[in-house]
Amino acid sequence: MESFAIGEEEYSWRLRNNFGIDETPAQIHQKGLELAAKIRARMEVLARQIDPSKDLAGVMADLKADHPVDDKAMMARYVELADRARDFVIRERMFDLPPDYKLKITETPPGMRSTISMAAYNPAPPLEKGRNGAFLVTPTEGNERKLSMHSDARMASIVVHEAFPGHDLQYYEFQHGAEVSPVRYLPRINYARSLNVEGYALYAEELMRQHGFYTPKEELAQLGMQIWRAYRLVVDTGLHTGRMSFQAAVDTLAKQAFLALPIAEAEAYRYTTMPLQAITYMMGRLQIEGLKEKYKAILGPDYSEAQFHKDFLSFGPVPPAMIEPVLLDQARRRRAGAGS
């Protein structure tokens, strides 16, 4: 076993005690493979619809070629997509948006550009009066390779994940709607918080896909992000339990998750230094989806997707396993009240 691996026993302990997950590393490894197979099957169908003359890898490569011509066009496109996402959410009644909700999109400040290479969400400082965060987009300064990372097909899922209805709405609902002191925070210890934060953002991506938000090319790009997160279950468990060598991890990410080789190498290295963090995106999404189904089953005909989102987001960045008993109890009491 390579020296960075924490081992099967430690990995299992962290899953159970930090994340509230009873599955074993082997089960998560297998789950990643099964999820990736399902996602790839859908990607193959979309690729044939987009260009029957090319295989999936070729179509994925072509998606990068269509991108904004410069930073001005890139920023305008992000604003356009954010407006489109907002209109779609209102039309589909997926969330009850606060009347004063407004998304802030801005260029990444110069001092932050070395760590935010593309785009990210920056929450508001807890004591800031307005308590509004910002969707940050890092200027490319005309660099063709950097512009290709903001491909027309990919930008939609970036907006959904980082901005709306992903991280920005997530933090807005908690900071403005919950009766919680602004000085309260949850430390990032053991990455349990990420099950909610990143899990929810990936959940938002999938939610918008299921409701039909994306064009075929946008959906293919979004599924490319999903398959990468599915292979994180495979690679992270593989690296830390001796199932996979470092080189095998790089090869898997490059060949199966369609990452450029330098990115695949950087990703695999990151996983070796941050055990379990990489799985929080997909495992968090699955936990939220499972919780949603239980909530829906309790409320039956009284279920509202918008109400579920409002109730869930009101807890803030708490691991879903900790939210579940409280949220389901609220649902039972609401159902009992509706029937009385």
Image (spheres, grey):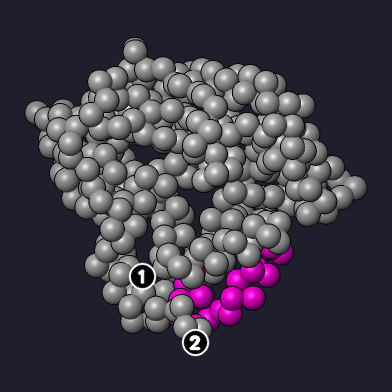
Identify residue type, mark 1. Glu
The x, y position of residue 340, in whole percent, is: 9, 28
Give the residues in magenta: 236-256
Of badges 1 and 2, the one in the foreground is 2
The residue that disc 2 covers is 1
In x, y percent, where is residue 287?
A: 36, 53
Give the secondary structure at mark 1: loop
Q: Viewer-proximal residue, 321 or 307? A: 321
- Which one is earlier in the sequence, the residue at label 1 or at label 2? 2
Q: Residues within 10 Å of mark 1 (few under 14, many from 20)?
A: few
Residue at label 1? 23
Question: Residue 321, relative to residue 212: is it above or below?
Answer: below
Res 115 visible: yes
Q: Which residue sits at x=70%, y=40%?
A: 146
Furthest toward the top, the residue is: 99
Characterize the magenta stretch by its predominant secondary structure.
Answer: helix
Asked whether the residues under the numbered discs 1 and 2 touch, taking CB atoms below 8 Å apart as contact, a structural biologist would say no
- Image vertical order of residue 10 relative to residue 108, above or below: below
